[in-house]
Amino acid sequence: MQSEPGFADGGFWARVAAEGAPLVEPDPDDPAYRLVTFVHRDEDPADPCDAVLALVHTVTDKDRHAGDLTPHLMERRPGGWSRTYRLRADHRASYQLYPVRGDVPGTARADWLRVLDEARPDPLARGPRLPARDGRHPSSVLALPEAPAQPYARRRDGVPRGRTVAAEAAGRRVDVHLPAGAGAGPHPVVVLLDGEMWGEVLSVGDTLDNLAADGVIPPVVALLVHTMGPGRPDDLSCNPDFVDLLADRVLPWAAAEYGTALAPDRTVIAGQSAGGLTAAFAAFRRPDRFGNALSQSGSFWWPDGTEFDEGSEWLTRQFAAGRRREARFYVEVGLQEWMLLPQNRHLRDVLIARGYDLAYREFNGGHDYACWRGGLADGLAHLLGSPGRAAADLPQTVRAGGAAE
C-alpha cells in the first residue's frame, strides 16, 4: 500500500469523474508496477459513513486471514474516501466496496460473511461487472494494462449463438450447452464442474460460442454439472464414486442424447478450486474417459491443509508413485493464492518429472472468477485447439520438459 496520489481534492474528484475508478498511475520507482487508487464518494456529505473497506479479491482475504483489515480501510478525504495499492501491472482482480456504519467489522467468519453479503460494486467504475450468485451483489473488475487478455469472456455481436438446455443425468442436474449449427457430431465434450455458476451466472456459453466462431476450438458440447450444493465437499474430494458416475453414466448419456464423442482425447474435464483437484483426479483415475484435465487454482493441499504434513497433497503423491497415465493437463494458479501456490508448483514439478503433457501457468490474480473465465478459454484452446498453436499463445506458460515461454 502507498500514500494517496499528491493532487488537490478538487482536482481529485474531477479526475475520477473524467477517468472513472479506480485511478491508475505509473509507479515512479518501477515500470513493472502501478499505483491503483480505489475511491468511494459519500452519497450524502451531511451523513458520511464511518469507514470504507476495500475488498480486493484474495488480497484483502489474505490480511483477513491474518486478523488485520487495517491495510484495506480507506483514508478520509474531503468528499469521500480513498486507498492506494501498489500492484504489478499484470494484476487482475474482482473487487467491491463496503461502507461501514458503526464499528469496523471483525475478521471472524460470521463477520466476514456479513461483509460479503452486503458489499457492493464500485459505482464509479466503468466496464462490465462480474455477476454473483446466492443473492450477493456483483463485483467490479480491475484489469491492469499488462493483465492477460480475455477476448472470449463476454458476449460478442455477430457470433452464432448456441443454446443451453436443462437436463438431468444419473440423478444429477446437468445444463447442456449445445453449439450453434454444428451438425450431427460426434462433438468434443467439456465436463465443467460447478456448472450452476458457469451457466446460470457467468454465461460460459458465450465463451464457448466465441471460441468456436473464431476457429480456436471445434464446436463442443459442454456438460455443466451442478456441484455447488451440500454434497460438494464429498463429490469434489478425489471421490472415485463421483468420477466413475461421470465416466460411466453421464458421458455415455451425453453421447446418446447429444452426439458427443466418447474418445478420451476429445473429452475435457474442467474445474476450479476443489473442482480443479477433481479434474486432475479424474484424469488420474479414469484416463480411459478423461484424456484432458483443466485445473484452475486446484486444491492440491487435500486432504490436509498443512503443506508439509505427511497426509497432505495426496493426489500429487499418487501421480509421483503411480504408473503414468495417457492424459494431458492444463494447470494454472494465481500468484496471490498464498494457500495454493506451493502445492500447484509441486504438482507441476511432479507431472513434468513423470513426462506428462502439461501446460502450466501462473497468473497475477487470486481465487477469482474474474481470472478463471479467461483462463478457462485459454485452457480449452490448449487442450482442444489445433496442435502447435496452443501453449505458444499462452503467456507465462511452462510446458512439460521445457522452460517458461
Image (cartoon, rainbow, N blue to C red):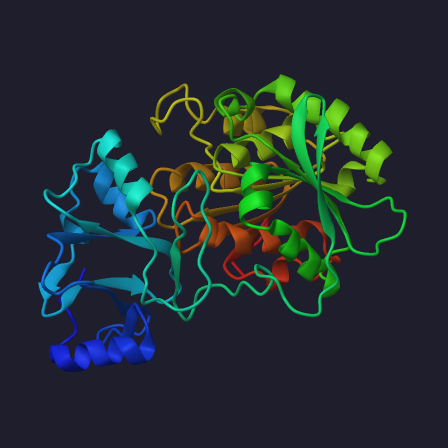
Q: Is residue 210 above or below residue 314?
A: below
Q: Position of residue 28 (x, y in %)?
A: 22, 77
Q: Position of residue 257 (x, y in %)?
A: 84, 34
Q: Is residue 249 above or below residue 27?
A: above
Q: Residue furthest right?
A: 184
Total marks placed: 0
Residue 285 visible at all: yes
Which quarter of the rendering shows the N terminus?
bottom left
Q: 352 and 182: which one is in front? A: 182
Q: Position of residue 94 (x, y in %)?
A: 38, 54
Q: Residue at x 13, y 53 (%)?
A: 51
Q: 327 and 246: which one is in front? A: 246
Query: Quadrant location of residue 32?
Result: bottom left
Q: Position of residue 206 (x, y in %)?
A: 64, 56
Left or right: 10, with 85 as reference point: left
Q: Residue at x 69, y 27 (%)?
A: 246
Query: Quadrant location of residue 355?
Result: top right
Q: Residue at x 41, y 19 (%)?
A: 311
Residue 324 visible at all: no
Q: 354 and 93: which one is in front? A: 93
Q: Is residue 245 above or below residue 357?
A: above
Q: Is residue 327 above or below residue 214?
A: above
Q: 352 and 23: which one is in front? A: 23
Q: Residue at x 22, y 40 (%)?
A: 64
Which quarter of the rendering shows the C terminus?
bottom right
Left or right: 94, with 264 as reference point: left
Left or right: 156, with 125 as reference point: right
